[in-house]
C-alpha cells in the first residue's frame, strides 16, 4: 500500500511545523526519517496517522485521501507505535496484543476464533508468545517494544508507523528491534516507516531515507545515494567521516565533529 503526501502543511494550533511537504513513501520497503530534534519527523508521522489534523494538502493511501477514510477503516490500513506508549497497569501481554483486534470487532461482540489465531500469530512473529501470561509492566524495555509491535501486527495492516522505537534501549536491544522490523518487512511485505535518531541504523536497515530540517525535506533516497558528507553537513551541521560497509556497501559514520 503506497503513501503519497502532497503539499502537506502541519501545525500545532498556530505554530506551523511543516510548511509544505511532498513525499512518496515506497511500498513494501523500510523508510527511515532522520534529522535534528524538532525538525518535523514525528509531526509528519502523526499527520500520516491522522493523530493531528493537517492544515493544508492531502495524504493518500493507495490513491485514497485519508480525509475520506473512517477512523475504523484507517486502523485496518495502518498501525502506529508512538513514542513511549503508556502500558495499562496490570495488563498481560496477550491482552494488550488483543487490543490490536479492536478495529475488527462489532458492537457488543467479543474476540472470535480468528481473532485469537491472529493474536497468537502476532506474538509468535515477534517472539513474545512465551511471555503471554506476564504483565507488560514487568518486562524489559526490549521485550515491551516487541509486545507493542505485536499489538500493531495484530491489526493486520499493510503499513506500520513507528516513532523512535529504539529510544532508551541499549545497543543490543536496538538491533533486536530493527532486525525484527527487517524480518517483518521481508516476510510480510509490510510497508514500514520509522522515525529514528541513530544515523548508522538508518544506513544499515533502511531501503529509503528521508532527511528533514526545520519542517522541510532536504533529501530522500537510498542510503548509499543520500547519506554523504554534504547532506550531513546541511542536515546536522556536522563534518562527518564516512566509510562504506565492505560487504553490503552502505555508508557508515565513523567520526564526526561540529562545524566551526
Image (cartoon, rainbow, N blue to C red):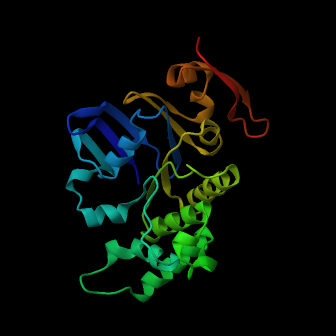
Vertical side of 23 occupied by 192: above or below: below
Q: Does any portion of residue 109 appear in the rendered image? A: yes
Look at 61% across and 61% down and name the residue there.
142
Q: Viewed as shown, does residue 97 lie left or right of 242?
A: left
Look at 29% across and 87% down and name the residue there.
109
Look at 62% across and 45% down and name the residue there.
205
Where residue 11 appears, x then y in whole percent? 26, 37
Where residue 172 appears, x then y in whole percent? 70, 53
Tell me where residue 237 sits by quadrant. top right
Image quadrant in which the N terminus is located: bottom left
Q: Viewed as shown, does residue 123 lie left or right of 61?
A: right
Q: Viewed as shown, does residue 212 lie left or right of 168?
A: left
Q: Is 239 or 84 nearer to us in this picture?
A: 84
Vertical side of 110 occupied by 37: above or below: above
Q: Viewed as shown, does residue 54 lie left or right of 36?
A: left
Image quadrant in which the C terminus is located: top right
Number of marks in the rendered image: 0
Tell me where residue 202 sits by quadrant. top right
Where residue 123 appears, x then y in whole percent? 56, 74
Amino acid at each position: 500500500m503506497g503513501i503519497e503526501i502532497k503539499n502537506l502543511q502541519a501545525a500545532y494550533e498556530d505554530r506551523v511545523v511543516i510548511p509544505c511537504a511532498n513525499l512518496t513513501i515506497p511500498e513494501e520497503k523500510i523508510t527511515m526519517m532522520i534529522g535534528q530534534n524538532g525538525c518535523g519527523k514525528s509531526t509528519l508521522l502523526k499527520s500520516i496517522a491522522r493523530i493531528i489534523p493537517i492544515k493544508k494538502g492531502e495524504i493518500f493511501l493507495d490513491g485514497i485521501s485519508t480525509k475520506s477514510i473512517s477512523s475504523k477503516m484507517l486502523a485496518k490500513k495502518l498501525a502506529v507505535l508512538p513514542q513511549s506508549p503508556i502500558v495499562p497497569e496490570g495488563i498481560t501481554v496477550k491482552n494488550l496484543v488483543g487490543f490490536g483486534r479492536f478495529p475488527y470487532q462489532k458492537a457488543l461482540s467479543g474476540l472470535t476464533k480468528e481473532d485469537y489465531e491472529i493474536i497468537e500469530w502476532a506474538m509468535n512473529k515477534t517472539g513474545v508468545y512465551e511471555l503471554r501470561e506476564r504483565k507488560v509492566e514487568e518486562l524489559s524495555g526490549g521485550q515491551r517494544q516487541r509486545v507493542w509491535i505485536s499489538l500493531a501486527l495484530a491489526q493486520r495492516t499493510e503499513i506500520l508507523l513507528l516513532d523512535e522505537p529504539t529510544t532508551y534501549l541499549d545497543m543490543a536491544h536496538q538491533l533486536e528491534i530493527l532486525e525484527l522490523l527487517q524480518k517483518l518487512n521481508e516476510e510480510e511485505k509490510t510497508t514500514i516507516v520509522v522515525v529514528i535518531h541513530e544515523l548508522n541504523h538508518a544506513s544499515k536497515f533502511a531501503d529509503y531515507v528521508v532527511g528533514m530540517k526545520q519542517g522541510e525535506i532536504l533529501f530522500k533516497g537510498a542510503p548509499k545515494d543520500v547519506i554523504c558528507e554534504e547532506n550531513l553537513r546541511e542536515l546536522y551541521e556536522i563534518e562527518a567521516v564516512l566509510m562504506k560497509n565492505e560487504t553490503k556497501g552502505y555508508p557508515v559514520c565513523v567520526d564526526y565533529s561540529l562545524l566551526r
